[in-house]
Amino acid sequence: MRFARRTIGILLAGMLLLTAGCSNSATKSAGPDVAKLLKAPNLSSSDGKVVLRLWSFHQSMEYNFWTWLAQEYEKEHPNIEIRVEYVSSDDYFSSTRLLSSFASGQGPDLFFVSQATFKRFSEANFLYPLTRLFTPDIREDFLPSALDSVTAGDDIYAVPFEMELLGLFYNKQMFSEHHLEPPTTWEEMMRDAQQLKTADVSGLTIETYDGAYKNFSWLPFLWQTGANLLTDDGMQPALSNSNVVQMYQYFRDMVDQGLLNLRPSRPATDIGILANGETAMQVSGTWNIRMLETEFADQPIGVVPLPVPEGGTPMTIAGGWKMAVNRQSAQAEEAAKFVMWAFAGDPAIPLKWVNDVKFAYSPRKSVMEAGMQSYRKGLRAVFTDRIFGTEREEPQLPEEMNRIFSDSLQDMLFGEDSPEAIVGKAEQEIAAALAHS
Amino acid sequence: MAIRPSPSRLEGGSTVAPRRISARTRNEWFTAYGFLLPNIIGLFVFVFLPILYAFYASLHDWNALSPKVFAGLDNYRKLLHDDEWWSSLKITLLFSVVYVPLLYFLSLLSALLMNALRGWTTGLTRTLFLLPFAITSVISAIIGMFMLDPRNGIINSLLGLAGIGPQQFLGSTSQAMYSVIGVILWINVGYNMIIFLSAIKEIPRDYYEAASMDGATGWKSFRYLTLPLLSETSTFILIVTTIGSFQALDQILVMTQGGPANSTEVSVLYIYKQGFQFLNMGYASSLAIALFVIIFCLSLFQLKLFSRKQG
């Protein structure tokens, strides 16, 4: 009992001290203000420099690029310190970490947005406008579609620095063993999948897991039918096209024949699915090229444009990350200068990103011209000569629309409803969502 | 029957001093509350305050980034007509109805078998049972996914040996929920088995000897001796697992994300999606409050049911 009393005494004394400490810091004018600390995480470093926090989800070479970039900027701007902080891609893609950090006033100064998150953050007024930093020369250098993708209302809110395209990757060895040519049409794609499918190898892998990437992967197939989710003015559903039902029917047939890889061993962004022999064909993007040139250099993998319906026009989708500045940041102006320095100034920096660190296209004409040589190496040439130019920019859709399309794909892949019913339901839901908004 | 006067009142109308609490009792209370205080503070800060805040948020239209706009009971009206919410409740109920009894019986059965084990294998077997629970639930769920992988999973390999073709498991709308239940059972049986086992060990051997002299062995001894003496443990396990089944999220999020075609989208997952994917924080809060009320009522009902049985 004596021990217990002593323990309680110590506990209470400790709590009293803590309380006293808290009340002191709250009343002392010179002490740290807790509320201020919580609301303003972007403190100057001890040596008086302005500290900018950059959140990156990248790994290995790509992460190293950001630390290199930070060092280069610090050399030119001794009053600035840039802290590159790693945040897992899940937290970026699903937005929970970014979201909670912004909601609590702890968001980074610099962060990446995709088309899926751009609309959300710009509508919530979390993006610092960069419009006045885009001089006429800079605007002229960017592709108009790339600038459109970061524009909300009359303002530009982010700097695009890469353009990723989708293509159909395939296992050359499997194709040659079966004397097959890579497909150019949907019909050929199904025929090839039928011939190449075995108990261990699926015919085709395309994203089936829920998330922004699933819609990104399937939208070009929808566009190839001549349809879209919304009309150009965004006021009406645009699914009422008999070709859309055919598209849903086509992929439902693939499912029914067991040709689709419904549960790939990893997300379909990862070319390892194809490289490890799990599938004969995989819909994926330019970001895999670097991996295929290094880690999977010995694998017989080729790439062709996405197959189209008979008589259809080639069509792919363009996406990619953009760098944005946190409007809440006390150092937003400094952060904006950094973004413009990095991706709107000297073409050598964005060129290093799209050519050396990874493979992507640049949304800037000057960078594309400077890197033209490397765009023709190996598989890059297929993207450059046959796929680049057929892209449509990933749309900024309201979350509700993304969800309706995603649900319709789930119904097609795993449900029982007929394609007509799935498309009809999606169209009704889009109309209802438009009416509600 | 005469009504007893209040102990604080004398017949003459004068009052007596309240019963004196001894210094020892006071010290014991002081000690007990002293030790409970950190937990009480923790509960208040991390449980009660968030619940109150969730209720406040549920009355607003809020996307977690922009300022809240008061919406009254709109979110609650919306949930009444939200088909996906009701569908997620049905899925949760299915999960609960299948999972809770299975977990109860498997844990009890494993505990009885474990109790019968003797020798060096006992500790090893207990460890093996507890291992899936001992590691992080997300890791266990990932291991479960590997086992259920349609191409390289061990379950399909075993089915192959029995002449059964490969199954899609988590990739099939009809099998996904049962596959998820199987993995979560595999994770949690060990923990509940340990609780049952410790309760079984508490039953004095004399009871069994007396029962055996009266001719009760085997099933009879289990039915009329073990099971009634485990009633309190059973109540605890049933209530806790029922509540847990309504709160299942992490393993399902890892294994299926609610798919395929929403076939494993339980209520908590739907709330999570509404909050963090669709940024309807106000609406998600109203769903969370609704689920809280459901779990609360269910727990009260269970408690009442079991206390009546025990009475």
Image: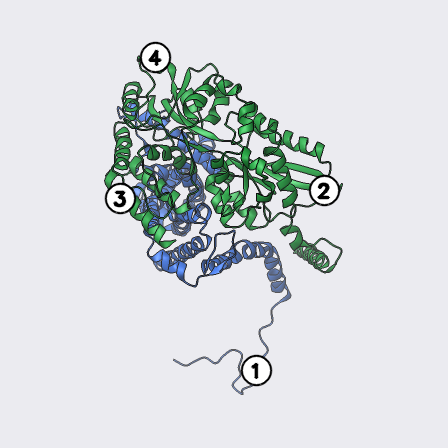
Chain colours: A green, B blue
Give the structural element (helix, strand or loop) at label 1: loop
Q: Quadrant of residue B187?
A: top left
| C-alpha gap between disc 3 and disc 2 | 58 Å
Q: Position of residue B127 (x, y in %)?
A: 47, 33
* Vertical arrangement, residue B48 with respect to residue A121, above or below: below
| C-alpha gap between disc 1 and disc 2 | 70 Å
Q: Earlier in the sequence, mark 4 or mark 3?
A: 4
* Vertical arrangement, residue A109 with respect to residue B61, above or below: above
Residue that carries the numbered disc 3 in the rendered image: A424
Number of residues whose C-alpha sits closer than 10 Å to that of mark 3, classed few (under 14), some (14–19) or many (20 or more): some
Q: Quadrant of the N terminus of chain A?
A: bottom right
Q: Earlier in the sequence, mark 2 or mark 4?
A: 2
Give the label, 4 or 3, closer to the camera: 3
| Three-letter code, disc 3 | Gly
Write down the chain letter for disc 1.
B
Write down the chain letter for disc 3.
A
Q: Nearer the viewer, residue A214 or A19?
A: A214
Residue that carries the numbered disc 2 in the rendered image: A45
Who's the residue at 61% across and 37% down the image?
A340
Give the label, 4 or 1, closer to the camera: 4
**Circles 1 and 2 on the same chain:** no
**Circles 4 and 3 on the same chain:** yes
Q: Nearer the viewer, residue A154 or A254?
A: A154
Question: Farthest residue in the bottom direction?
Answer: B12
Q: Nearer the viewer, residue B270 or B101?
A: B270
Q: Are marks 4 and 1 in contact (CB under 8 Å)?
A: no
Name the side, left or right, on which A24 lies relative to B297.
right
Write down the chain letter for disc 2.
A
| Three-letter code, disc 1 | Thr
| Three-letter code, disc 4 | Ser
